[in-house]
Every structure is written in structure tokens, then in C-alpha cells.
Image (tube, rainbow, N blue to C red):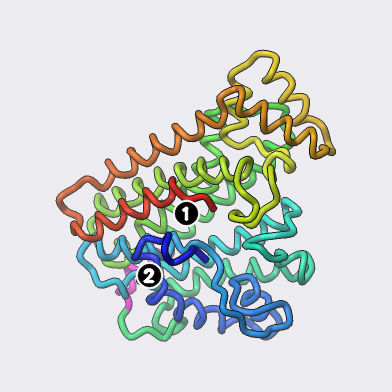
Amino acid sequence: MIPTEQAPPVFGRAREFVAPAMRTAVGRLSAEMRPVAEYHFGWADADGRATGGGGGKGVRPALAILSAEAVGADAVIGIPGGVSVELVHNFSLIHDDVIDGDVERRHRPTVWATFGIGRAVIVGDALLVLAQQILLDPAGTLQLDRVADGDASRRAAARIADSTAAMIAGQALDVAFEMLPTVDVAGCLAMEGGKTGALLGCAAAIGAELAGAPSEHVAALDRFGYELGLAFQAVDDLLGIWGDPARTGKPAWSDLRSHKKTFPVAAALAAGGAGAAELAALLATPSLSDVQVARMAALVEQAGGREAATEEATRRLGAALVAIDSPFFVAAAQAELAEVARFVIEREF
């Protein structure tokens, strides 16, 4: 959860729309899977007891709601899109934790570390399927009175399917990069565009798609989300190396421990010289000590990787804001989209 005083107001408003629908959606899972999903979302502890938590930043549902409002539709039209995108995102988180061997997320044990790899994989799969079911039958699955027409819902389902395919391709590149000695900046951006940009683009466009907005306006919102996704990922890359574990919920230097070739690392390797050579050698070392990981972080910073990632986040933020600089979009929603975008690159968690 984002501390209330730090979150843009739209996060709370979007949560009021989307949170009840999320619980309705998860309630459709079988008795074997539902408790695991509820644990992952922070609604229950490992024994099934209700908690006061609610995991995640809520960026994607907020974008889905705002994209409907940006084209003049009521926020409720974006609810199925917000739920669907959030389910896809959490499917990827559960599977990512398995792939990376991460034992902590959001300041508590991950799903696989708590319930085992098998159950984690199955629940992740279930969330992915549920995301499609919601868009294909929003009235039935979410028990909503007002939903988009059938054609708009099908277009939204196709959009999320394409975005999910791009995200999975990006994740496959991310895993493949761990086995390569070096990765260039262009390759890193291609990976991150799929891994993060595609789904955020979908989130920022899906409400407008459900509202039946003209294709050029949906495309502009998608571009906004895609560029924001690259800014989001650049910040995540910074936090993955230099983030405060008390804020991020992940161990210090977590990305370096996993040999991830994130943007700061790719930029540092591209700088060349003795520091880049030493960094490449450390990245090729199978098991790293804390001293070696700390040295890697220092090398990345000395080679300009930290500064390059910060500049990339700022540049992508500018590109995102340009994408929605149009008199067509409702001014209030446009302003809130910009507020969310700025929050994304200023966050520390």
C-alpha cells in the first residue's frame, strides 16, 4: 500500500471503484486457489485470516479509470479494464518471484515461499485466465450494472491479450539476459518496453477502448502509458540497486544479486573502460558475496549508470506528457494522468 499522504488522490478514488470488483473477481476462483490469491493481494495472512492490507501501488487501475474519464466516459466503464490489467500484472509478479527466487514482496514472504512453487504457478495461471473472462463477460463476472457494449469489450480483451504477449516476451528476454555477459542499452530498452511498457500502455488505453473512443485517441493514451512504463521501469531499476529495503520490500541490491542487466547496468557496461570490464566479470560470477555486490553497485554508479537511468526516466516522462497534450482529452482527467506520471518517477518504493 502507498501511504495515503504520498498518493495522488486518484489512487484512492480508483481503489473505491476497482477494489470491490477485484474481490468479486478473486471470489470466483476455486477453494484451493482463492486463499493463495487473497494472501498475495494482502487481504489475508497465510492462515486465511483477514488483514487490513491491500497490496500494490494501484497505478494500473488508476490509469484504466482515468483513461475512461479522459474520453468523457463515466469511470465505471473502466472498472473491468482496471481489474483485468491488475490481474495480469499480479500473475506476472507471482511468476516472476518464482523465476527470480525472490522470497519477499511487499514486506512479507512471497506466494511461492509460503505455499510452494506448484501452487504459486497455478494461481498465477488462474489470474491470467480470469483477466480475460472479466473482459469477455464483465456483467456476469463482476456483477456490474453498467458495462461496455460487446464490441468494445472484445476489443479490450484483444488489447490485453496482445499486451500480455508482449509482456511475456519481455520477461523472456529478461531471463535470457541473465545468461549473457553483456547487454546493450537498446536491447535493454526493448526488453523493458515489453516487460513494463506494454501493460502500462494497455492500462492507460483500456478504459478509453471500453468507452468506444476513436482509435487515434486510444492510441495516444496507449503511447502515454508505454512511455510512462519505460519511466516506471527506469525508476524500478534504480530502486532495484539503490532502493531502501525498508521502503521497497526487497533486499538491498536485489537486481544485482540476480545478475539482472537492467538499464543502469547496461549503461555502465556501455561506458567501457576498466570499471566496465570489472563489472562484466562480476556479473559473470555465479555466486556473489555482499562485498562483491556492493562493489558492483559502486561500479555502476561510477560509470554513470545511475545518472543515465535517472535521465531516461525524466525523458520518458516528457514523452508521455506530450502524448496526451491534446484538446480532445477532458482537462481534469488529463491533469490527473500527468499527476500519476510525475508520481511514478518521484516515488521511492
Above or below, comparing residue 197 to residue 319 in the picture: below
- Given residues 153 and 97, the one toward you in this image is 97
Residue 18 x %, y %: 42, 74
Provide the residue span drawn in magenta. 147-158
> Can you see residue 155?
no
* Magenta stretch secondary structure, dominant: helix
Residue 277 x %, y %: 72, 19
> Can you see residue 20?
yes
**Residue holding disc 2:** 14
State the image quarter where residue 264 is shown.
top right
Mark 2 touches mark 1? (CB < 8 Å): no
Instruction: Please rate how many residues cluster around mark 1, counting C-alpha atoms within 10 Å: few if below 14, some from 14 to 19, many from 20.
Output: many
**Residue holding disc 1:** 199
Find numbered disc 1 in the image and state the secondary structure of the residue it sits on. Answer: helix
Residue 149 is inside the magenta segment: yes
Q: Which amino acid does the dot numbered 2 rest on?
A: Ala
- Residue at far left of view: 327
C-alpha separation, residue under disc 2 versus residue under disc 1: 18 Å
